[in-house]
Amino acid sequence: MEHFLLHCPHLLSQQTALRSRLSALAITTLNPPTLQAASGVHPSRQPAVLRLTCAFLRKTGQLPRL
């Protein structure tokens, strides 16, 4: 999962967009717990983190493979 979310070179453009959007929310810790469950994120920002992660998953087209 970490490779898919953060390191897969085939998804670089989607990962870059996700990082940029999260950075705009002052989310700097990018790891699976943060992206999958908004763990360690201020409660007011948790819904946005989860929405952005879901959008990333949809845009990759790889969700059925997970």
Image: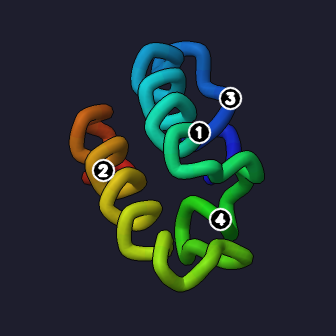
Say which mark, if any, is on residue 23: 1
- Residue type, mark 1 in image: Ser
| Position in image of residue 53 (x %, y %) | 41, 54
Question: Disc 2 and disc 4: Cα gap in Å?
Answer: 18 Å
Secondary structure of the residue carrying tag 4 is helix
Residue at x 23% of width, y 45% of height: 58
* Residue type, mark 2 in image: Leu
* Pair 4/1: label in front: 1
| 2 relative to 48, above or below | above
Task: Determine the residue positioned at 41% across, 25% down.
Answer: 14
Give the quadrant of residue 48.
bottom left
Q: CA distance from mark 3 to mark 1?
A: 17 Å
Q: Are marks 3 and 1 in contact (CB under 8 Å)?
A: no
Q: Mark 1, residues whose alpha carbon is within 10 Å: few (<14), some, or many (≥20)?
A: few
Residue, disc 4? 34
SS label for mark 2: helix
Between disc 2 and disc 4, the foreground one is 4
Q: Which mark is residue 37?
A: none
Does 50 sit above or below residue 54? below
Real-space Cα separation, disc 1 to disc 2, in angstroms: 23 Å
Identify the residue position indicated by label 2 in the image: 63
Q: Identify residue type, mark 4.
A: Thr
- Secondary structure found at label 1: helix
- Res 7 label: 3
Is 38 placed above or below 51 here?
A: below
The residue positioned 56% from the left and 34% from the top of the image is: 19
> Label 3 to label 2, Cα distance in Å?
16 Å
Crowding at dot 3, Cα within 10 Å, few <14 / some 14-19 / many 20+, comes out as few
Q: Are marks 3 and 2 in contact (CB under 8 Å)?
A: no
Q: Which of the image's four quarters has the C terminus? A: bottom left
